[in-house]
Image (cartoon, grey):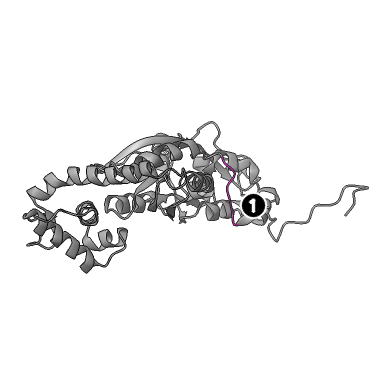
Amino acid sequence: MPQPSVKQLEAFWWAATCSNFATAAERVHLSVSSLSKRIAELEAALGQPLFDRSGHRAVLTEQGQRLLPATLEVLNAMAALGRTLDESPARAALTGHCRFGVGDLSALTWLPAFVAAVRQAHPRLTLEPVVDVGGVLERRLADGELDFAVIAGRSSRSELLSQPVGAARFAWACAPQLAGAGRLGVAALLQRHPLVTLPQSAGTTRLLDDWLLAHQATVHERIVCNSWAAVAGMLRQAVGVGFLPAHWVQALQLRSVGARLPLAPLHYAFQWRRGDARALIAAMQPLVQARVDFSASPLLAGAGARKQAFSAPARRPSSAPAPRSAPGASR
């Protein structure tokens, strides 16, 4: 009986753990027909069907389910063997392709430092960060399109596992020139001005809903955007009221509101698929844990944009008179 090859086992593992063969084929850089051929060759070598193809989509047979844990052990053992036999530290590091997901806040804060650390530790590992809202990342992770993701909160999906890695703290804020900013609380401001916030699928939705419920506050209008940078920009332009990472408020010369009624911290987790015991996951977890820092200064479109965003005063409304120069002051 011909022996299964590592490539056949790799094709089987991805096909068994992804939502469909098309996603699995993409992960191993094959066409769907080539992936199916490798799986058919593996089934022929073992003399047993691994997938039931009679329905709308292929599902694992009982034999396939039994083979899956052993397949992962073989793939991990082969990867460890390659690292052991290679004496060069750089070449002994992880290789291949890693596609992972983070939210917009992570991308603006700790993601660059994490990518630099991974590049130094695993120079032959190709990284592909995917930036999106938490709900989308969680679905793509469950479907096998991502290797792991750092998402706000623990996953409610049974097929995903979560490991806490850090927390972000937020504060309510608005532009100093927003009507009522100096005398009204958050609940009253939300009745007069739009709430500028992220979409419902973002992890901050639970944080917002809990705060509104706890303080019996309502929102009369929302402006929804999936970019923290855009939310911050609209708040600086006095479009409405919203919340930002706490350390951004002063840096962006915004007015902090609702300090007596703070938002709860938002906890983030490293999420991966249940049963995925690849060396890649074990290596990425501590690197993420060491680099997650939501207090890092946001990276907004290069150094010039960062300087402008954190140093320039908020733009005056066109109707506001220009301030007079103090006597003796240079113009």
Image location (x, y in percent) of residue 294: 52, 40
Q: Up-down: is 206 above or below 317? A: above
Q: Quadrant of the N terminus?
A: bottom left
Q: Up-down: is 183 above or below 52? A: above
92 within the magenta span: no
Task: Tell me the SS state at disc 1.
Answer: helix
Image location (x, y in percent) of residue 237: 61, 55
Q: In which quarter of the image is the C terminus?
A: bottom right
Q: Which of 285 and 199 is in front in this view?
A: 285
Crowding near the residue tagged with mark 1, few <14, some 14–19, many ≥20 C-alpha atoms within 10 Å = some
Q: Which of 331 and 305 is in front in this view?
A: 305
Dividing the picture into quarters, in which one does residue 224 lie? Answer: bottom left
Q: Residue visible at 17% across and 46% down?
A: 68
Q: Can residue 156 be seen here?
A: no
Left or right, 329 with respect to 50, comes to right
The residue at which mark 1 appears reads as: 306
Q: Can residue 293 be seen here?
A: yes
- Name which residue type carries label 1: Arg
Q: Residue visible at 21% across and 68% down?
A: 33
Residue interval drawn in magenta: 296-301
Q: Residue visible at 78% across and 56% down?
A: 322
Extreme residue toward the top, this view: 260
Q: Residue visible at 17% across and 65% down?
A: 37
Left or right, 134 with respect to 328, comes to left
298 within the magenta span: yes
> Of helix, strand and loop, which mostly describes the magenta segment?
loop
Image location (x, y in percent) of residue 138: 33, 49
Total labels drawn: 1
Q: Which of 246 and 136 is in front in this view?
A: 136
Image location (x, y in percent) of residue 282: 35, 39
